[in-house]
Amino acid sequence: MEHSYANDDTGNLILLEHVNLKIPNQILATAFYVTGLGLTRDPFVMTGVENMWINIGRSQIHLPHGAAQRLRGSVGLVVGELDALVRRLRSVEPLLAGTGFGWTERAGSVEVTCPWGNRYECLDPVNRATSAPWSQIDLGIAFLKMDVPVGSALPIARFYRDMFDAPVDIEEKHGLHRAIIDIGTHQQLLYVETTEPIPEYDGHHIAIYTAAFSEPFRRLAEKGLVYGEEPHQYRFVDLVDLASGERCFRLEHEVRSLHHPLYARPLVNRNPEQTNRNYLPGADWRGGRF
């Protein structure tokens, strides 16, 4: 048999569930995330004016009200066909004038910047390579790519491997390294070394689900890294070199067990191409399959 069962192995990290970024204006956020990117505001949870949960397949972007936070890197998204995306972005351009909003069309992607400077790499779902880890995502978060200091990618990879039993890999280009941490079957965390200055951490966070929940907690607690213990979840923020104890990078992780009540919650994902003028019965929904 040609097929290798090793290709079907997955690690302990199951799902990159959300990215949380504070924003100061919910109206501008609606124009960008819902009308521009074509995503869906969760109709059941956080429906007020102080927070907004944006559904994207099986994952979310959480947008609580507050001083703007900026990810030190970018988020890889699959939001649908890129031509339709660009049409939507053009439609919101007047609404977002005077902000940091903009986009650049590239081969295989459109890089979009939100009104507060967060960058989203919207990937081409039509001409994608079948070998791409995210190739089976029709709507969702494909990866989180973080800029990290030179020399930190290898210890960060070891941190996820030894703390979480996650599959990791290292790539090298022009003397700089990239740590690749697999999540589930199609998502990744990418830590990419850069010689450019890296802004100070401002408190944004991500949420991940893990199958073996207690052992990573024990390991993190032994290092004095864990806090925010609640039923079915805990948090840590420092990625450290396990050999020296030195901090490599800061990114708060909200770590959840599969017993968390929000795990595998069905999310509503609308078809942004539906309008009252071209309405097609039965075409309101998008799946967000993995």
Image (cartoon, helix red, strand yellow):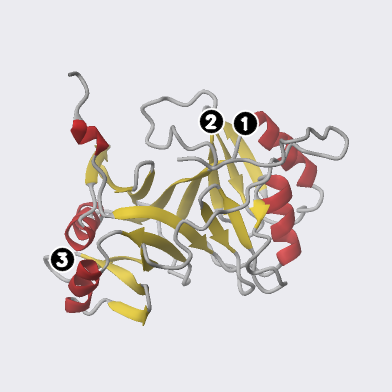
Upstream in sequence: badge 1 or badge 2: 1
When the figure is inspected, residue 194 is found, relative to residue 253, above or below; the finding is: above
Label 1: element kind: loop
Q: Any mark on residue 236, and which? A: none
When the figure is inspected, residue 127 is found, relative to residue 167, above or below; the finding is: above
**In front: label 3 or label 2:** 2
Going by the image, does 3 lie left or right of 118?
A: left
**Residue at numbered disc 2:** 125
Residue 178 in picture, x, y percent from top left: 29, 45
**Residue at numbered disc 3:** 242
Marks 1 and 2 close (CB-CB < 8 Å): yes
Q: Distance between the residues labelled 1 and 3?
A: 42 Å
- The residue that appears at 43% across and 32% down in the rendered structure is 135
Upstream in sequence: badge 3 or badge 2: 2
Q: Any mark on residue 81, and which? A: 1
Foreground residue among 184 and 193: 184
Q: Crowding near pointer 3: few (<14 within 10 Å), some, many (20+)?
A: some
Residue 233 in picture, x, y percent from top left: 37, 73
